[in-house]
Amino acid sequence: MTAPSSARSGRFGSLGPGFWFRFGSMAIIDAMALWAMYSLIDQEQWLVMAALAVGAIGLNFIYFSSKTIPLRYIAPGLVFLAVFIIYPIGYTIYLSMTNFDQANNVNKEQATASLESIKVISDDPAEFALTVYEAPDGELRFLLVDDDGATCFGEPRLKTDPPSDTTCESIPLDDPANPPDEIDGSTKLRLIDLVAVEGELLASAIDTPVGEAVVVTASTAQSGQIQRYTYDAARDVLVDNIEETECVPTDGNYVCADGRTLTPGWRIFIGADNYVDALTDQRVGGPLLRVFTWNVIFAVSVVFLQLALGLGLALTLHNVQLRGIKFYRSILILPYAIPAFISVLIWRGLMDTNFGPINNDLLAWTGYAVPWLTNGFWAKVSVILVTVWQGFPYMMLISMGALQSIPTSLIEAAKVDGANGWQTFRKVTFPMLMVIIAPLLIASFAFNFNNFINIFLLTNGGPQLLTYDVPVGETDLLITFTFSLSQNAGRFALAATFAILIFIIVALISAFSFRFTKRLERLYGNL
Amino acid sequence: MATSKPTDSKVVAGQTTLGTKNKTSFKVWWRDKGWRHAVMWVAMAFAIYPVLWMISAAFNTFNTLGSSNLIPTSVTLDNFKELFTNPLLPVGRWLWNSFYIAFVVATVQVVMSASAAFAFSRLEWRGRRAGLLIVLLIQVFPQYLAFVAILLLVRGIGDVFPMAGLNTHLGLILVYLGGSIGINTWLIKGFMDTIPFSLDEAAVVDGASHFDIFSRVILPLTRPILGVVFIITFVMIYGEYILASVLLSDTNLYTLPRGLFLMISDSYTANWGGLAAASVLASLPVIAVYVPMQDQLVGGLTSGAVKG
């Protein structure tokens, strides 16, 4: 069915190629949404499924109603914004109010099942000598012989499989201590053959009339395994069959009468506890204050030094005709043009304490070496130095632009009033400059406040501080600290808590920036 | 930069040079311009030292730290060859991964942000102001802060669509696509606002539809900022570490930042020659774009920052 691309307007808009493009795209999107809903029903994720259904119906409406034309333009961006920013923000807030970590990341049923699957050897295990045979079909057969010479021959299964009804059977043997080379058509494996199947053997078990026997070594098996914990659903307690105590679900874990907390636990909602811990608990909150202080020092000194250097260079080039100025600029832009992750790794090599070229030269000239990345103080100096190196060209460029845009009449007026060069700079040029670049400085502060790449790739937050309950180092920023909380310590909920705290700080900086800019504009006028 | 206005000192310099001895003229030259050259050379030395070392180490025969000098004793291309032949450190693949992921993300971002910016800048609709406010608020939140939630989200997506789950490039690309849409829309909208509305009106009189106005009138005029947004997004994704390292675990799927870190993170097996060679290859395209476009890029960032 072809439609003329011009007229044919209806309630679906014109039926031109635009319509068919929308029709085709939405057909694909709807098919994917239906498929996703189908499998979400399977996983019993009702809430997500409902959200998806509402979203899909909304999209269809937007692209087929003629009253929602503006929304057609923002819908694609909006979908990605909603799914990959807004939803993760909400989910992070939720996670920060749970106890989600390495040992608490499943639901209660899964945690209980996992504990119930723990088996231990009873006080009185039975030992068997194990001989392995291979049936004509290539499958393994086990022959168990106990101390009294009782035998049992049969088919093994995986330890992880549930016990089967068919157990091994007793067979008459002339000399149980020396099993024959062949039983029922199955041939005995030589020791050398066992090597090839040892992995399989160790994962195997066999059901005997007296219960399960598991393979311990390639030549022994053991029975007498018992289930350590049994869940009593009626009373909602977990019974410990060995210690003969009961474990009660408490705050996401089973806690036994003798004080043991069992893992894995499960995820529960714990409200503001993580925030309280982060701000008050010394083992967690101690590093937080320390990291925060250093984080502010880092961001402030980086921005200040970048500006000092950049502005100094801009002033050096200002209002003067130098030969080679283009060349200077092209070279000076390099630190800013090279992607940060690359230059930081290069600096890491240069600053290596033992083999780095910088220390090599220092040693050769002065006899001293600097522990750039291995000493707490010097590591801080190093990350600041490298970050200043990266950012000063940017500050130089924006300062040069800003200096140009300051009206020369103001400078001349100051001179007429008898101000000298320094006074003119301090009272006229610098304040005017600040009006223009203050928002950029705050943006730069916000960026460096979360400068993950530089810290992570240069020092990885180190050198490590060992006095705390959580992994933290001398040069850790809040963001790298948060990252290692989740990657190295598995404290996901705490990491989410820190992420929200960082976000609050960043939002405050932005709000402050906004008001500050407004105030500056009132003071000096909008340039 | 070069201004036509001579400064006072320059005038003074001109006067003194007339009819004085050479020694004084050097002094004057030094006071007027010479020290500026000196400052520039010092600054350039600081700026270029790591770059020179990187280039020299890339061509050095030995790939340990201790044996690399600023001037290599012998030159070789082995470091570069190894990037594409060592199966344990597939640097060539990482380069390609980073490149195509950043390219796809930047392209789709530009299209989505430009079209959203069009709706915000040119069309009248209810909720426009609220929408703008939301965009403004959202762009304050750095996406990578939510990496734990994003990990779980992508795992969930993988349960339904395995091709976009954990350890897939598609999953990572989708996540990145949500990343900087707020700031990009804001940047492009700011630029679009400066295009006179009379152009739209003229197009409407000529019978143009909203899509004609978007694609034939507005988009061609926004091209400069679209280029800037593309480059900024490309470079940002090219160097993104947190989400890439959380979502990708297979070495062959790594992006450059993650891969290069792997190359040198163990100090006993660190391959600095390889790192330097990879760094040269990986930074060349970015430098080639940045140096000629520095003014536009800084300008683009600046206007975004001022407004944000």
Image (tube, coloured by chain):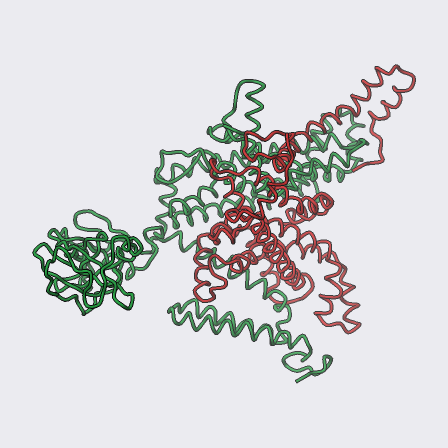
Answer with left or right where residue A348 lies relative to residue A315: left
Q: Work out whether residue A385 can be spotted.
A: yes
Q: Residue furthest right?
A: B19
**Would you place residue A321 above or below residue A261 in this image?**
above
- Image quadrant where one finds the N terminus of chain B: top right
Q: Relative to the observer, which residue lies in front, B165 or A185?
A: A185
Answer with left or right where residue A517 lies relative to residue B18: left
Q: Position of residue B21 (x, y in %)?
A: 88, 14
Residue drawn 17% across the image and 64% down it: A153
Q: Relative to the observer, which residue lies in front, A57 or B57?
A: B57
Q: Relative to the observer, which residue lies in front, A156 or B202?
A: A156
Residue drawn 56% across the image and 75% down it: A27
Q: Position of residue A387 (x, y in %)?
A: 58, 36
Q: Chain letter for red? A: B
**Would you place residue B15 above or below residue A69 in this image?**
above
Q: Chain letter for green? A: A
Q: Position of residue A181 (x, y in %)?
A: 20, 60
Residue drawn 11% across the image and 58% down it: A176
Q: Quadrant of residue B78?
A: top right
Q: Work out whether residue A251 can be spotted.
A: no
